Image (cartoon, rainbow, N blue to C red):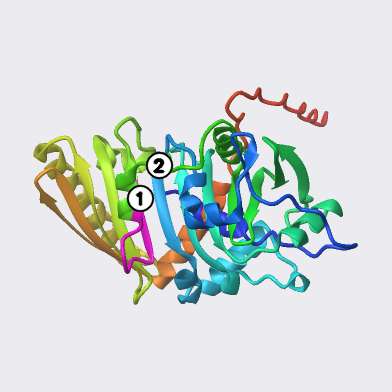
Amino acid sequence: MRRLPLVAALALASTLAPGSGGCASVPEGVVVNGARVDDAAVDRDPLALLPGGVIALGYLDAAALLRSPIGPDVAALAQRLLPLGPESGFDARRDVVRIWGGAYSMQGVDFCAVVEGTFDPAAIHRAAEVGAVTALGAPLVKSSYAGNDLYTSDNIGFVVVTPHVVLAGNETGIRRALDRLRGSKLERAVPAWMVDIASAKNAAMAGAADLSDQTPPGVLASALGGVRHVRVLGNFDAPGLNLAGALTYADAESAAHAVSVMHSMTGALMIAGAASAFGNIPVPKIHTEGQANDLAFTAAFQESALRPLLNLVESFSRKPAQPAPGRAAAPASPAPAAPVR
């Protein structure tokens, strides 16, 4: 699911920047249906913060990922997206535990995540009060939305819900979540079957998607065209990332066609790897087979193949902002005139 929005959410957790001044007054609890909910209720079930209408739900054991060989690369990605000053006392590799992320658009312009770990609401508040500037050159800005303190930096928004839970996403996604909480109860709105898959035991990462009404983008259309549901489990053991899952189609014939397409794509990848002048194209080991209406698969990615995936994640989270539900898009600034030659 995209650069997977889940890594972008990890970066969001790193916005704890150094503050100044005395103790800040930080509202306690998120506003749900006009009233603040105590921390314990949120900590018991953080998934209740995510809005419904999710296309894909993913789970990431952030601690396991950060302990993996690409942990330093993930930490560097977080630093580039939304840096954390060392004087803030926050360390993503130590303080982020797990992430639940929901994608609401195949184009990646609408995602929301729940980040669980250890956070300092007062430190974030102070950083926003002094306009702490991130590595992106954009300040951390505090505003109010739906009765909550909303922090944003370059189209990334988050709400510190409790000292252990942050609700994060791009501006469209975070406002979608807060709009939903403004007029509902604190209860789960994501499909139970997705949660069951994403919370599988012993999985360092997991995901589920309902693509029944979606058109897969680009090169994935030939293999995923007609797919209804996606289920995947994974870990970060050697050689780097290991996945197992299934794509569910409307009938066995469609599943068999998808298996054929995947075999062709795998063959093309192997040829590309063998033809590389430098021999540095990491080709994943992929096995697929048809099982009734499913295309079952396993895949093993080398550590070196994961770094390009991190780059994809970064580009995914940096998609331009879209109008949030019920909000008009701001007029674009006029482009500078081209010089006359």
Q: Is residue 229 above or below residue 297?
A: above
The residue indicated by pointer 1 is: 195
The crowding category of the residue bearing disc 2, from other C-alpha atoms within 10 Å (few below 14, some 14 to 19, many at least 20), is many
**204 left or right of 313 in image:** left
User: What stretch of residues is rendered in magenta?
Assistant: 198-208
Camera-side residue of 258 and 159:
159
Q: Earlier in the sequence, mark 1 or mark 2?
A: 2
Could you tell me residue 237's position as x and y percent?
A: 35, 75
The answer to whether residue 228 of the structure is visible from this angle is yes
Could you tell me residue 87's position as x and y percent?
A: 78, 73
Quarter-of-image position of residue 252: top left
Residue at horizontal 42 percent and vertical 57 percent from the top: 59
**277 left or right of 20 in image:** left
The residue indicated by pointer 2 is: 190
The CA span between labels 1 and 2 is 7 Å
Disc 2 is placed on an element classified as loop
The answer to whether residue 312 of the structure is visible from this angle is no
Residue at horizontal 59 percent and vertical 41 percent from the top: 174
Q: Amino acid at mark 2?
A: Val
Could you tell me residue 203's position as x and y percent?
A: 34, 66
Could you tell me residue 197's position as x and y percent?
A: 30, 54
Label 1 close to label 2 by CB (< 8 Å): yes
Camera-side residue of 315 and 51:
51
Disc 1 is placed on an element classified as helix
Asked whether residue 199 is drawn in magenta, I would say yes
